[in-house]
């Protein structure tokens, strides 16, 4: 979430310059920046396009609480870390994107160290045997402890075949 005011400040853009660039009257733009008006669809599309999506229609409404926003930031950071850790585990393995997404979800749930211990699973991935990888997931201690999650992810892994 980035308000138009934050966007202009972050990129050191004046209201006058932005007004010219998006062809929105200065006085109208000022009202948008200070929350006195919400842009029309036409103007919102111009703002969104010019900011390359950094400022969207939602940014003009106070629909997301700061608590929700903090949760989203935490989620994005954790997901990013899980993705990086999955890449480290897999090294230079060239696997199907769906299989990669399963590894990311597993790392997110169990952590890098635990997923690194799934040797038979990782060997199956290395050989491109997604069915065997799925079976290794189901047969693992993790698979027995969390059967619904493991089965859902194993099904996803199988569909990479």
Image (spheres, rainbow, N blue to C red):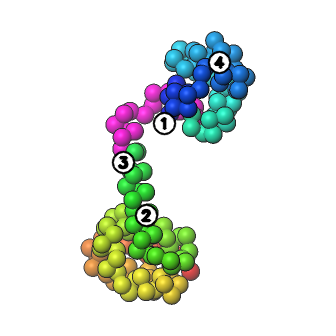
Contact, CB < 8 Å: mark 2 with mark 3?
no
Q: For the residues marked 3 and 1, what is the alpha-carbon distance in whole angstroms?
A: 14 Å
Q: In this picture, which residue range is highlighted in magenta?
A: 56-71
Asked if residue 124 lies in the magenta stretch, the reply is no
Residue at 42% x, 71% y is 88
Vertical placement of residue 128 versus 69, above or below: below
In terms of image quadrants, where is residue 45? top right
Secondary structure type for disc 3 = helix
Q: Earlier in the sequence, mark 2 or mark 3?
A: 3
Q: For the residues marked 2 and 4, what is the alpha-carbon distance in whole angstroms?
A: 41 Å
Horizontal side, residue 50 vs residue 159: left or right = right
Q: Is residue 137 visible?
A: yes
Please name whichever residue, 4 or 133, is drawn nearer the observer in this view of the structure: 4
Q: For the residues marked 4 and 1, what is the alpha-carbon distance in whole angstroms?
A: 23 Å
Single out the mark in the foreground, 2 or 4. 4
Vertical placement of residue 49 versus 32, above or below: below
Q: For the residues marked 3 and 4, what is the alpha-carbon distance in whole angstroms?
A: 35 Å
Q: Disc 1 marks which residue?
A: 1
């Amino acid at each position: 979430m980035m308000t138009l005011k934050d966007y202009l400040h972050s990129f050191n853009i004046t209201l006058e310059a932005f007004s010219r660039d998006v062809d929105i009257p200065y006085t109208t733009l000022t009202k948008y920046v200070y929350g006195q008006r919400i842009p029309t669809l036409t103007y919102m599309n111009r703002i969104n396009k010019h900011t390359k999506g950094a400022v969207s229609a939602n940014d003009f409404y106070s629909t997301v609480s700061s608590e929700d926003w903090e949760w989203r930031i935490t989620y994005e950071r954790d997901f990013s870390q899980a993705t990086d850790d999955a890449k480290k585990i897999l090294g230079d393995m060239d696997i199907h994107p769906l299989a990669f997404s399963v590894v990311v979800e597993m790392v997110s749930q169990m952590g890098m160290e635990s997923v690194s211990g799934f040797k038979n699973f990782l060997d199956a991935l290395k050989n491109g045997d997604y069915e065997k990888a799925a079976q290794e997931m189901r047969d693992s201690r993790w698979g027995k402890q969390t059967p619904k999650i493991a089965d859902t992810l194993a099904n996803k892994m199988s569909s990479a075949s």
